[in-house]
Amino acid sequence: MITLRTHSIVVCSLLLFYLMISFCFAQQNIRKRNFVIMKGRRILPSNTKIMTKIVQSYMACAALCSKQETCCYASHDSNTHRCDLDVSCCPQSEPLLGAIMFRILSVSLSCQSGWHKFGNNCYYISNVTKSWNDAEVTCKQNGSMLAEVKSSCENDFLKTKVNGSLEYWIGGTDIQNENLWIWSSSETKLTFFDWSPAQPNNYYGDQHCLEFNYKSAWNDKECALLRPFICEKSLLQ
Ligand SMILES: [Ca+2]
Ligand SMILES: [Ca+2]
């Protein structure tokens, strides 16, 4: 009788333990998305815009943003009912009476060890040096890409994370068409720039890769040179 009772207690304890563990893992998998709201501002149109739609309320706009995995910011104008969704976690904005701008926070998601979180992305700053091509391959092997720096605040964030005395490869290149700079992974044109004065100069006609943190800005550099590099991946993949 006592053995049976002990057995029942052990089974119940194991079951409870299993349920607790399952619950913890389930919690980790939840993409909890909260909003940070700013009244009286709206997002300005930019190349990082996902879509514009007419919807009746800002909550409907928020729901649209929630459905778009890459949406970081959205705004809703109560007069025109215009809802703008944007990929950027620091979009250009302007004051507009009756508008509500809100940021989607993926608060429950965190980056793996050694990666830095900014917005909905994780960044890895390498401490080994590679050519631009090898750096690109290495990022891809780690499920990421060479960083695509698309806004001034993303740019400023990365400047605070790198070693100030080193230059790093990021994902821009003009190797296919001289002076037509694209982000290699997303194959999109660069629209935000932080060139150092007199750059890009395509020195000796052989500089086609984007060097980050050259005199605290950007430079075009020979792709075969060895540099540390910055990888980027989305938290929402
Ligand atoms: Ca060039
Ligand atoms: Ca240069």
Image (spheres, grey):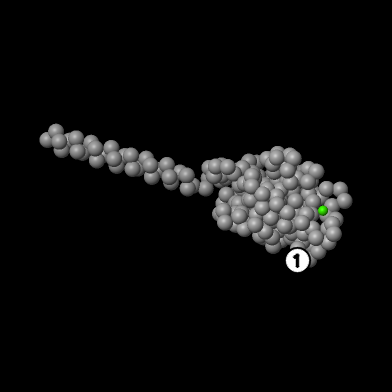
Query: Furthest residue to the top?
Result: 2
Quadrant including the N terminus: top left
The image shows residue 116 at horizontal and vertical percentages of 61, 42
User: What residue does disc 1 label?
Assistant: 176
Q: Nearer the viewer, residue 7 or 133?
A: 133
Query: Furthest residue to the left?
Result: 1
Q: Is residue 179 left or right of residue 123?
A: right
Q: Label 1 crowding class (10 Å Cα cut-off): few <14, some 14-19, many 20+? A: few
As drawn, 71 above or below 24: below
User: Could you tell me which secondary element the residue under label 1 belongs to?
Assistant: loop
As drawn, 3 above or below 146: above
The image shows residue 235 at horizontal and vertical percentages of 57, 49
Q: Nearer the viewer, residue 160 or 18?
A: 160
What residue is drawn where x is 43% and y is 45%? 25
- Inspect this view and state whether residue 227 appears: yes
What residue is drawn where x is 57% and y is 56%? 141
Circle count: 1
